[in-house]
Amino acid sequence: MDADRRRDVGLFRYSIVCELASMSPRVRGRAVRELAGREHLTPWGERVRISRVTLDRWSRAWREGGFDALVPAAREGVPRTPAGLLELAVALKREAPERTAAQIARIISEREGSGPGERTIQRHFVRVGLNVAPSRSPALGRFEAERPNELWIGDALHGPPVAARKAILFCFIDDHSRLLTGYRWGLREDVLRLEGALRRGLESRGLPAGIYVDNGSPFISGQLLRCCAVLGARLVHSRPGRPQGRGKIERFFATVRSEFVVEINARGGVADLDELNRLFCAWVEHVYHQRVHSETGQAPLERFLAAGVPALPPSELVREAFLWSETRTATAQATVTVHGNHYELDPALQRRRVELIFDPLDMEHVEVRFQGRSLGLAVARQIRRHVHPRASVEPGGEMTPTPTGIDYLRLIEARRREQLEARIDYRTLNNNDDHKEGRS
């Protein structure tokens, strides 16, 4: 198991047991029983059940050693099986991919008189990437989540130009209802713009149990992995070259191009990102969410709210989820350097590997954590960067719009503003009540 795989295993374990650490023993026992009674989706798309004994062991490891204790230890070993026999096993597998490890073990034993066992061959196939079963049929069934917020699908769309640059839409769609949960237009295809869309969804639509994304650079960043680990949401990536399960958001993107982007182009563009986001929000909330979906037979908002309004995550949890994290080893003088900034730590942390937690837009204030425990703020000795190099703000720039004809999107925005400003005049109600009492 390579380092990336071991880290993914640690994040998966962390996402399951992170909430258990702060619970009392009685409450933790009930939570462990509930977790052991249902299936969990691994980062590799497998559904597994985890025993109470394992959950207790992970929880104890997290309390005693922090995140590092949840990462499997690296195993180094030298195969005792002759290399020639392993190469023969690989050749037999490639010759006929349908052959099982047990069958290959029998063939080698028959030819050589003896050979490696079935399990040895299986482990070797895993190391060389031959453990994937061949596909027998291209036919795939349709999947749909059983309830709202069970699965969000995220992706990015290249849209119209803004300030002479291509605008990028990051958005997440609820697999069950087709409701657009979080969305945001930006001018960069990076993790900061991705987190902006995800945060909007969390604060307005609730917490998803799982998030399904592709393998673009913003979606495989360590920041997004940490965010999902803090939230307790499973992060699943689609396999390269296999876009199955992404049809719903691709269909939505087609609708955006044919109904929204075409109107942006027809009106001559937009002045800035704020205008683009306002118009898009109006179209989403008052056209797309209110219209009956052709596959579900319900409007996305109606289907999403059918079981009631979902609970929103605590603001403290959301804030923690979108802090960034980097690890450093302190010097003998208990100092660390992060992107040119120099910080002084507690003297007890000299030569210790620590985790630094910070807002990417405010690197002057950095929290120090050791083995999962907070040790307060680092002392900033020299600050050259106040903003993380991968968290730059959107550039300015003006684009003069030249609208012609009917401004369809502006009409939608105006209707949305009227609905939001509509309020019940309680003074009128009181006057009517007084008038009725006077007549009686």
Image: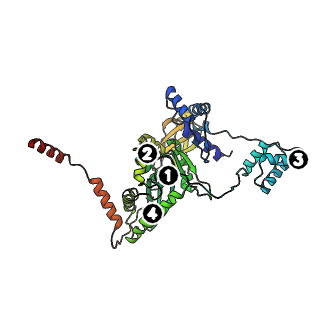
**Cα separation between marks 2 and 4:** 24 Å
The label nearer to you, 1 versus 2, is 1
Q: Is residue 9 left or right of residue 268?
A: right
**Mark 3 or 1 closer to N-term?**
3
Q: What residue type is labelled 2?
A: Gly
Q: Sort mark 1 into few (<14), some (14-19) or many (20+) by Cα contacts within 10 Å.
A: many
Of discs 4 and 1, which sits in the foreground? 1
Reading the image, the residue beneath label 4 is 256
Q: For mark 1, what is the residue?
A: 175
Q: Are marks 1 and 2 in contact (CB under 8 Å)?
A: no
Closer to the camera in the image, 218 or 379: 218
Report the Cα–Cα distance between label 4 and label 1: 17 Å
| Residue at x 41% of width, y 62% of height | 396
Q: Distance between the residues labelled 3 and 1?
A: 52 Å
Amino acid type assigned to the residue bearing label 1 in the image? Asp
Q: Is residue 329 visible to the viewer in this orientation of the structure?
A: no
* Element on which disc 2 rests: loop
